[in-house]
């Protein structure tokens, strides 16, 4: 039997009794046992939890039978949660993150906790203290980070959906590198309670799936106020307009962007044009400063958030921090320290204001912005590990959405000549997720998109 | 702007309670200098008359009523993350010397 690739296929199969939830879960674990050694997507496999949940599937719930894996930054009550770091190697939370709870109550079945760059620090998955995750489409290449295991587990067909966090690129980049849909929601749309904090003015909780419909179904469950994250308020989401305009920002199609990437992303834009949507050339001139703003504000907040890990109440001593965490903690302490605060941190917060104004202006002219996710296709393992700055520049097209608090949806759009996945992203004004979903579904319809997993 | 001295690396490491080996000091000095040099490009942007942005929600002073909505952790749960406990308390290293 072939594993279903979407929520619809899964639930239809269960309703028509083509398979039972227990059989389904057994099949996933058979694949995990067979392929995880090579891919290294999982840090903890939760077979007991999954079998129990599978036995009591309730077909009245919206996500019944949907198998999920959580990025190991999501607290799971009674199940080890490492953040990909040796500091939390043996940490077992006493409560679950809101999103974990909500998905469980909606009927999802948890298969395990998946690998990530330690604390979410990285764009390739190589900064995990539990070893790098491999890209199932070609194991010599990175799956993208920091939600590396969340993306690789889906590309290797070891789960149906997965959770991730996106602080600078961490859902959209791995989604693109692994041929998946990935949502970075509006800042303040999904509660972060119980998710290990990285940079609190940028952190968002997103997820991965193989089609827009599934992204939408999961978002219906995860979004909304919970009383434990004061940035989340129940608001009215914008509705998609009947006639939409899509902005093409010239700063995202500059020299230096890989030609195969540009070609694929422009190809996606043409699909919309063919459907009668107007493409509008726009300019976001401060894009070139986005990485600098990000690599001041993010480490400043990281240095504060990681201050709590003292090895006293839980977790191991600070000597267990890896290189990237140490770099970011020190960089953050530096830009916040006396004598440098004004020149770096305050300056970055001001340039952030310009960036926000620029996007606000753009959204007066267009309903969504279409752009590449990454300036390159997936790169090889080891290619950028010794040069942190080069690694940081992989985030050049994604960090603006975090700095401005807007949503972004990554959508797959083909493969390179070498067979590596390519994708594009749609960004919209705050709380315009429904517009992005409508555009995602239109793209799927017009391209007759079929979900596809890697051959292992 | 744009580079960190060895002393500055040691200073920020101390501020952040990180112990570095001498090899790490050399490595991080080089890497952090390169990053700081890059982010210094912001100095060319005119930011006069601009307010800094610290968050994007537009929300201000989010309040809730001062009442207990759910029980907190039990003492046992709160202590479950460490073996260094004594009589229901966390054990920490002494911070004040006797003499």
Image (cartoon, helix red, strand yellow):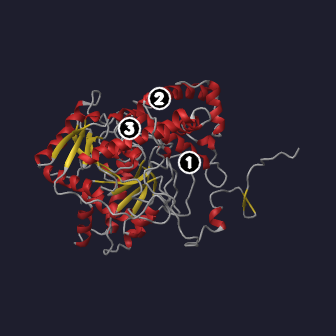
Residue nearer the viewer, A452 or A328: A328
* Identity of the residue furthest to the front in this view: B49
- Mark yes or no: residue A270 visible: yes
The quarter of the picture where residue A258 lies is top left
User: Where is residue A367 shown, x and y percent of the image?
Assistant: 24, 50
Q: Which mark is residue A395?
A: 3
Disc 1 designates what residue?
A: A305
Q: Which mark is residue B43?
A: 2
Residue nearer the viewer, A46 or B90: B90
Q: Which is closer to the viewer, label 2 or label 3? A: 2
Give the mark nearer the N terminus: 1 vs 3. 1
> Residue at (57%, 53%) from the top-left corner?
A90
**Disc 2 sits on a residue from what chain?**
B
Residue nearer the viewer, A129 or A373: A373
Residue nearer the viewer, A186 or A214: A186
Q: Kindly report the distance in space between the C-alpha atoms of the residues bearing marks 1 and 3.
A: 21 Å
In screen coordinates, is B60 left or right of A304? Answer: left
Are callouts 2 and 1 both on one chain? Answer: no
**Disc 3 sits on a residue from what chain?**
A
The quarter of the picture where residue A242 lies is bottom left
Q: Secondary structure at mark 3?
A: helix
**Disc 1 sits on a residue from what chain?**
A
Rendered position, A400 above or below A207 = above
- Mark yes or no: residue A125 visible: no
Q: Kindly report the distance in space between the C-alpha atoms of the residues bearing marks 2 and 3.
A: 21 Å
Rendered position, A367 above or below A342 = below
Q: Secondary structure at mark 2?
A: helix
> Residue at (38%, 38%) from the top-left corner?
A395
- Graded by Cα atoms within 10 Å as few (under 14), some (14 to 19) or many (20 or more), the crowding at tag 3 reads many
């Amino acid at each position: 039997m072939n594993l279903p690739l979407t929520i619809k296929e899964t639930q239809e199969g269960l309703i028509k009794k083509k398979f039972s939830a227990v059989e389904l879960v057994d099949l996933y674990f058979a694949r995990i046992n067979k392929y995880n050694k090579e891919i290294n997507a999982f840090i903890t496999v939760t077979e007991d939890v999954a079998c129990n949940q599978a036995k009591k599937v309730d077909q009245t719930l919206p996500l019944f039978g949907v198998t999920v894996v959580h990025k190991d930054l999501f607290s799971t009550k009674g199940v080890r949660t490492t953040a990909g770091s040796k500091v939390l190697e043996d940490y077992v939370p006493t409560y679950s993150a809101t999103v974990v709870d909500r998905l469980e109550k909606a009927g999802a079945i948890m298969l395990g906790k998946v690998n990530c760059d330690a604390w979410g620090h990285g764009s390739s998955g190589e900064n995990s203290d539990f070893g790098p995750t491999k890209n199932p489409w070609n194991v010599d290449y990175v799956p993208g980070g920091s939600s590396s295991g969340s993306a690789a587990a889906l590309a290797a067909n070891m789960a149906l959906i997965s959770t991730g966090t996106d602080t600078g690129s961490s859902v959209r980049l791995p989604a693109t590198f692994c041929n998946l849909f990935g949502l970075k929601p509006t800042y303040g749309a999904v509660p972060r309670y119980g998710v290990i904090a990285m940079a609190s003015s940028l952190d968002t909780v997103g997820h991965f799936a193989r089609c827009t419909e599934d992204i939408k179904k999961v978002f219906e469950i995860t979004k909304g106020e919970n009383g434990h994250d004061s940035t989340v308020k129940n608001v009215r989401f914008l509705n998609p307009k009947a006639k939409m305009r899509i902005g093409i920002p010239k700063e995202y199609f500059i020299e230096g962007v890989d030609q195969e990437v540009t070609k694929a992303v422009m190809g996606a834009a043409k699909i919309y044009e063919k459907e009668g949507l107007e493409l509008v050339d726009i300019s976001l001139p401060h894009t070139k400063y986005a990485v600098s703003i990000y690599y001041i504000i993010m480490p400043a907040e990281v240095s504060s958030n990681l201050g709590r890990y003292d090895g006293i109440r839980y977790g191991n001593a600070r000597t267990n921090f890896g290189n990237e965490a140490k770099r970011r903690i020190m960089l953050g302490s530096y830009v916040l320290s006396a004598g440098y605060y004004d020149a770096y941190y305050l300056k970055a917060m001001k340039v952030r204001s310009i960036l926000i104004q620029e996007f606000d202006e753009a959204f007066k002219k267009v309903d969504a912005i279409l752009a590449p996710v990454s300036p390159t296709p997936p790169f090889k393992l080891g290619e950028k590990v010794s040069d942190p700055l080069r690694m940081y520049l992989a985030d050049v097209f994604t960090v603006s959405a975090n700095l401005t608090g807007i949503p972004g949806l990554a959508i797959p759009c083909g493969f390179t000549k070498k067979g590596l996945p390519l994708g594009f992203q749609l960004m919209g004004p705050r709380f315009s997720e429904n517009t992005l979903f409508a555009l995602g579904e239109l793209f799927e319809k017009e391209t007759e998109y079929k979900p596809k997993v890697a051959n292992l | 702007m744009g580079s960190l001295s060895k002393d500055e690396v040691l200073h920020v490491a101390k501020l952040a309670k990180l112990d570095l080996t001498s090899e790490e000091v050399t490595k991080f000095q080089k890497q952090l200098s390169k990053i700081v040099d890059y982010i210094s490009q912001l100095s060319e942007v005119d930011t006069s008359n601009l307010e800094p942005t610290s968050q994007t929600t537009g929300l201000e002073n989010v309040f809730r009523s001062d009442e207990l909505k759910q029980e907190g952790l039990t003492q046992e749960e709160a202590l479950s993350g460490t073996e260094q406990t004594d009589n229901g308390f966390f054990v920490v290293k002494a911070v004040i010397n006797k003499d």
